[in-house]
Image (cartoon, rainbow, N blue to C red):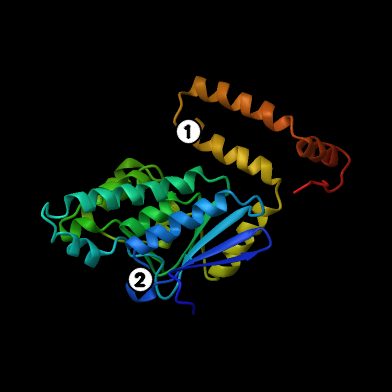
Amino acid sequence: MSDDILLRRDVASISYLTMNNPSKLNALSDEMLAALQATFDSIAEDDGIKVVVLSGAGKAFCAGHDLRQMTAARQSEDGGAAAFGDLFDRCASMMMTIKKMPQPVIASVHGIATAAGCQLVASCDLAVAEEGTRFGVNGVNIGLFCSTPMVALSRNIAPKHAFEMLVTGEFIGAERAHELGLINRVTTDLATATEELAGTITAKLGAAVKIGKRAFYEQIEMTLEDAYAFTGDVMVKNMALADTEEGIAAFLEKRNPNWSD
């Protein structure tokens, strides 16, 4: 396997990203965060990519922050305060980039996804997990409440379930994660299930998916009345696309649409 900390492989209109530091369980080190941020920024500008799939090399998806790097930062005069603040800011920026980029991002999860690794799963638009995968926001077990992972987690699952995970540090399995809404699918064949989901999305009109993803995250923060007003305008703009006109015509004429993308 390549020595690159993040691998990218584009197949047709799907970009497959693999976090590639298995000896550290693909921890979100400074280097990993920088690689993810730069790659997500690049893909966001790539009109040829419709879907992103994010996975981890080795036996785990991602074990969260690099605790050795964090411990080393304590040697500074301020005890690491500035370094920790910068780390959490960079991590939050990367997580928010996933929501802001036009392409849907699918987490393809196996092994474990813990602390900021679980945050990463929760930050992705969709998630598929292999049977036996375990999820946890377990920082409390070492005296560090997972406050930043809490942001993404509490926006995926009900508050009491999220707080239970955070305050107990206990792990949940893939089936429970599915029940709670953290992941979309559980499978015995992770690669195939992920590819099928990605392929289903790529078959849709890319422009409509981009419009829809942005609108989804914007409206969810609005009041009901504002959300309907906002999404009505979004629908008008979507209807104005020539490819949407073609899609409707194809449906009425019982044929496949001839979309430009």
Say the numbered circle drawn on residue 132: none
The residue sitting at 44% across, 58% down in the picture is: 36
Q: Residue reaching furthest front?
A: 77
Return the residue at label 1: 220
Secondary structure of the residue carrying tag 2 is: loop
Three-letter code, disc 2: Leu
Q: How many marks?
A: 2
Return the residue at label 2: 25
Q: Quadrant of residue 244?
A: top right
Q: Is residue 257 left or right of residue 140?
A: right
Viewer can see residue 28: no
Mark 1 packing: few (<14 Cα in 10 Å), some, or many (20+)? few
Secondary structure of the residue carrying tag 1 is: loop
The residue sitting at 54% across, 37% down in the picture is: 216
The residue sitting at 68% across, 29% down in the picture is: 237
| Percent coordinates x, y for residue 44 in the rendering | 56, 49
Mark 2 packing: few (<14 Cα in 10 Å), some, or many (20+)? many
Seen in the picture, residue 25 relative to 214 is either above or below; the reply is: below
Disc nearer the start of the sequence (2/1): 2
| Percent coordinates x, y for residue 122 in the rendering | 41, 51
Three-letter code, disc 1: Ile
Viewer can see residue 146: yes
**Closer to the eye: label 2 or 1:** 2
Q: Residue reaching furthest right?
A: 253
The span from disc 2 to disc 1 (Cα, nearest Å) is: 33 Å
